[in-house]
Image (cartoon, grey):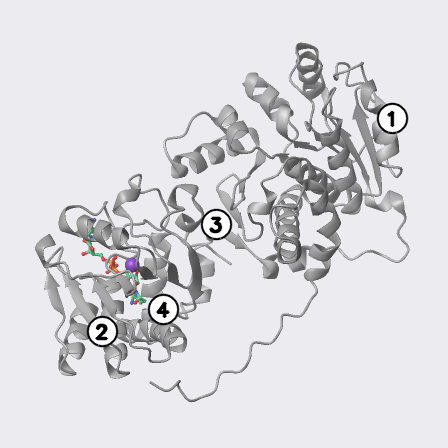
């Protein structure tokens, strides 16, 4: 699914209105009615106090439509116009009049003295600012957002929590409304996945308002939200006549005294995802450990307690390098020589990223489309300190373009960066915050490349499957007992899940719920 930026959404709105013969007011009516139905099907007429805060733009128009439907269905509603400007849109005015026509006059708020009392047990519908936010909320609209946040009331945000830009950092989280749930139009917004917005965005879902898909295609959006629909077609079926050589040879380079577990996990993961052959290349101290831990893997050794020579005999399809490797001086020197001579595709993780960051010229030697899988600290070493999350993404894009590499920014929502393109992962949860989880990801991506998946696809696909293991496992064992080895245990379920039919939702009846 595409993630459109605010300009693309505004263009798609216009194009849909122009080519599909639907008026802007009708588009708004459809969109906001879907939001009303969402709430109505949950409340079933309960008399919880509902406050609808409407701005003066089209987001406010959505709020007015919802307020009208809520009134007409007998809810206990108060509607307010947050009068931060006199630039009321036509669609706002039309729906302002429609609300008045049913006898309901919104209260106009122009000053903080006019804020209504909002109680914790009420519901707030947030239709103050939407996609047209052009600057941080200030004055009484900022105070209103802060007041609503202070009540901790459940807030249903329409399209986007007010004060949040859809595609860039706000930099002042105190001017963003903290939404309990967001009903967002047409597509998820990049802002939902930025760690700095974690307070403001909780759960969300997309409301399909039928914007013109053909037109959206012409915009060639660079950002994508990766779910099962995107992943399933990437799967490569296995030929009946294939043999182990068909599925490539992964070489996992890493380990140091006390950190052989990292290379063990990565090697196991490469095997488990289907690499035909796997060799681990470690210091001598890892030999027995690896041979005993993974009978399926071959092992080559280097110097005693840390890597030094990088002179393996294996001719791999792909190399995953870094897990547990350490950054000792001898490893650093050997690594630099290895990188400057290597031509084999690379997946670079952990200490290999740290060593790369120490010597930026090295990156020019990386084979095209090498994959780097940094966690936030490693990323910072690589691209420098960022001002905010948008700056972080821009810096990663710049690094990716300058060095022709793919960067996997690991976080609650992992983002794969390929030049300007962003692929935001939908799977995974807090269970993955555990030692060795990154080593397993390195092994998975390496093992996918070994089997012939293109590097970018291997990164996107690997990140998705890795996250999916946690989604499935946490239903069965919770978060805490989940370890990196659990990822390996649940990889088969994550793959099989791609081919599971979704359970049919119970059919909604034609009749609306009783008031
Ligand atoms: N047919 C359609 O197009 C559909 C659109 N839909 C809905 O429309 C929403 C987008 O509507 P919108 O473009 O009118 O923007 P919205 O956010 O409501 O308000 C912008 C106004 O606020 C002002 N303003 C901005 N920042 C400010 C600040 N900090 N402090 C004070 N003022 C500020 C800004 O002023 P300006 O920047 O021009 O100075 C302008 O006057 C979208 O999110 C969705 O909900 C759906 O119904 C589906 C159909
Ligand atoms: K909003």
Residue depth check, mark 3 versus mark 1: number of the one nearer the observer:
1
Q: Where's residue 497, x and y in %?
A: 69, 61
Q: Quadrant of ligand 2?
A: bottom left
Does dot 4 land on a helix, a strand or a loop?
helix
Quadrant in which the C terminus appears: bottom left
* Left or right: 261 as drawn, with respect to 58: right
Q: Where's residue 308, x and y in %?
A: 75, 14
Which residue corresponds to mark 2? 77
* Left or right: 123 as drawn, with respect to 429: left
Can you tell me whether the CB of the residue at mark 4 lies under 8 Å from the nearest atom of ligand 1? Answer: yes
Labels 2 and 4: the sequence-earlier one: 4
Q: Residue at x 20, y 61 (%)?
A: 55
Which residue corresponds to mark 1? 288
Q: Where's residue 10, x and y in %?
A: 32, 59
Whether tag 4 and tag 3 are in contact, CB under 8 A, the answer is no
Q: Residue at x 64, y 24 (%)?
A: 352
Query: Hey, which quadrant is residue 403 in on the image?
Result: top right
Can you tell me whether the CB of the residue at mark 2 lies under 8 Å from the nearest atom of ligand 2? Answer: no
Residue depth check, mark 4 versus mark 3: number of the one nearer the observer:
3
Which residue corresponds to mark 4? 16
Labels 2 and 1: the sequence-earlier one: 2
Labels 3 and 2: the sequence-earlier one: 2
Q: Label 4 to label 3, Cα distance in Å?
A: 21 Å
Depth check: 388 or 432 in front? 432
Does dot 3 land on a helix, a strand or a loop?
strand
Q: Label 3 to label 1, Cα distance in Å?
A: 45 Å
Which residue corresponds to mark 3? 223
Mark number, residue 102: none
Residue depth check, mark 4 versus mark 1: number of the one nearer the observer:
1
Labels 4 and 1: the sequence-earlier one: 4
């Amino acid at each position: 699914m595409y993630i459109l930026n605010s300009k693309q959404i505004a263009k798609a709105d216009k194009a849909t209105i122009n080519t599909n013969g639907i008026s802007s007011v009708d588009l708004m009516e459809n969109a906001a009615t879907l939001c009303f139905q969402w709430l109505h099907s949950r409340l079933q007429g309960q008399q919880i106090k509902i406050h609808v805060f409407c701005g003066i733009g089209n987001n406010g128009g959505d709020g007015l439509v919802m307020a009208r439907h809520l009134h007409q269905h007998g809810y206990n509603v108060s509607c307010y116009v947050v009068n931060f400007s006199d630039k009321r849109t036509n669609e706002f005015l039309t729906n302002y009049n429609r609300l008045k026509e049913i006898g309901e006059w919104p209260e106009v708020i122009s000053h903080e003295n006019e804020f209504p009392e909002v109680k914790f047990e009420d519901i707030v519908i947030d239709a103050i600012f939407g996609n047209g936010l052009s600057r941080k909320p200030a004055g009484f609209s900022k105070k209103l957002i802060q007041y609503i946040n202070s009540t901790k009331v459940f807030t249903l945000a329409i399209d986007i929590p007010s004060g949040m830009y859809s595609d860039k950092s706000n930099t002042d989280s105190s001017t963003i409304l903290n939404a309990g749930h967001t009903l967002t139009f047409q597509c998820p917004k990049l802002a939902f996945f930025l760690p700095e917005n974690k307070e403001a965005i909780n759960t969300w879902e997309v409301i399909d308002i039928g914007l013109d898909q053909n037109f959206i295609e012409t915009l060639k959006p660079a950002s994508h939200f990766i779910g099962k629909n995107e992943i399933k077609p990437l799967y490569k079926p296995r030929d009946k006549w294939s043999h182990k050589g068909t599925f490539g040879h992964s070489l996992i380079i890493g380990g140091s005294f006390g950190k052989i577990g990292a290379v063990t996990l990565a090697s196991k993961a490469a095997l488990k995802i289907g690499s035909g052959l796997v060799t681990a290349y470690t210091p001598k101290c890892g030999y027995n450990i690896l041979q005993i831990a993974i009978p399926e893997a071959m092992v080559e050794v280097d110097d005693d307690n840390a890597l030094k020579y990088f002179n393996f005999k294996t001719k791999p399809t792909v190399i995953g390098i870094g897990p547990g490797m350490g950054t000792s001086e001898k490893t650093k020197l050997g690594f630099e020589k290895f990188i400057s001579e290597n031509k084999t595709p690379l997946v670079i993780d952990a200490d290999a990223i740290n060593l790369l960051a120490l010597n930026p010229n090295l990156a020019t030697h990386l084979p095209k489309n090498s994959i780097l899988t940094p966690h936030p600290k490693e990323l910072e070493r690589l691209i420098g300190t960022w001002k905010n999350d948008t700056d972080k993404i821009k810096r990663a894009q710049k690094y990716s373009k300058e060095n022709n590499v793919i960067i996997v920014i690991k976080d609650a929502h992992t983002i794969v960066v390929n030049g300007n393109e962003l692929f935001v992962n939908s799977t995974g949860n807090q269970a993955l915050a555990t030692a060795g989880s990154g080593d397993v990801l390195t092994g998975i991506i390496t093992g996918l490349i070994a089997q012939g998946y293109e590097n970018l696809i291997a990164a996107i696909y690997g990140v998705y499957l890795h996250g999916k293991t946690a989604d499935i496992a946490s239903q069965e064992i919770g978060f805490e007992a989940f370890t990196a080895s659990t990822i390996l245990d649940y990889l088969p379920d994550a793959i099989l899940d791609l081919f599971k039919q979704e359970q049919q939702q119970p059919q909604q009846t034609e009749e609306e719920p009783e008031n």
